[in-house]
Amino acid sequence: MVLVVDGRAGLMPDDSAIAQRLRKSAKKVLVAVNKIEGKDDTRNEFTALGFDRVVTLSAEHGLGVGDLLDEALAEVPRVEAAEEEAPPRRLAIVGRPNVGKSSLLNRFLGEERALVSTIAGTTRDSVDGFLEKGGRKYQFVDTAGIRRGRHLKENVDHVSVVLARRSLERADVAILLLDAVEGFREMDAVIAGHVQEAGRAVVIAVNKWDLADESGLKQKAFREVIGDKLKFLPWAPIVFISARTGHGLNALLDAAGRAY
């Protein structure tokens, strides 16, 4: 408790009455003698209040305020400031409809957080999910499929496009998801352009690679196609994954960490 008294007026009966109440409270009390401008030390006069700790100051001129704060905090236990927790790395999963964005998110999180359907574009809204792996925290922003403008037949589809672009703005790293079975499409390049415009780090993830053998797919050939179609993203690492089986997901997180 800080008992403020008027050094110009001197010790007043009200000061003694307040001091008596404070003594009954058993709280630690610091007497602050204010308005001591141009006066000799008035501490002795106020020691009659019965408190050992008395400081003088002038609030108007800022004199002794620092000493008051030091004295007031002298007996307050010091607590080490907790280290600020590192924010999660925000990953935006982007790609055209039905390439497996929701399935990838669900595989990472191990739960059905996003709607999964074989009907293209059924993820209408952004769905965020959080993952902690290897001492690192991740925040996934699963987006609605980005569609061609001429296919926007419903207002809700237009909202999906807006949400997808917003998710890129929220992200640190974009995971551009491609469909190995359907192959590279023009829309994949359009979405990659959105990523570049947003200025985000990017990892290219080729999904459904568990079907590569039966489809006669080879990684070298697929890399060459990506390199030819996405000449403006030559630095983007390429990871071959399967959201269905979980193959390559650790490598994808590692690549996202390096891109970050």
Image (cartoon, rainbow, N blue to C red):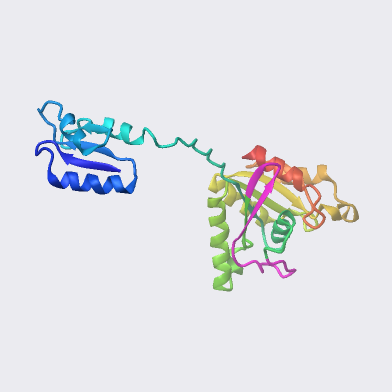
Left or right of residue 22: residue 198? right
Residue 235 appears in view: no
Given residues 3 and 14, the one toward you in this image is 14
Residue 97 location, x and y as percent?
Answer: 68, 63
* Residue 119 drawn in magenta: yes
Residue 237 location, x and y as percent?
Answer: 70, 40
Residue at the image point whose x is 24% and y is 42% from the top? 3
Whether 154 is drawn above or below 114: the answer is below
Given residues 258 and 192, the one toward you in this image is 258
Residue 7 location, x and y as percent?
Answer: 13, 36
Left or right of residue 21: residue 97? right
Residue at the image point whose x is 54% and y is 66% from the top? 159
In the rendered image, the residue lying farthest to the bottom is: 154
Left or right of residue 193: residue 110? right
Residue at the image point whose x is 90% and y is 56% from the top? 214
Q: Bounds of the magenta span? A: 115-138
Given residues 174 and 196, the one toward you in this image is 174
Residue at the image point whose x is 30% and y is 40% from the top? 29
Given residues 161 and 85, the one toward you in this image is 85
In which quadrant is the C terminus drawn? top right
Marks counted in the figure total 0
In the rendered image, the residue lying farthest to the top is: 40
Residue 128 location, x and y as percent?
Answer: 61, 58
Left or right of residue 116: residue 17? left
* Residue 245 drawn in magenta: no
Residue 34 appears in view: yes
In which quadrant is the N terminus drawn? top left
Kindly indicate the quadrant of the structure image that contains residue 153. bottom right
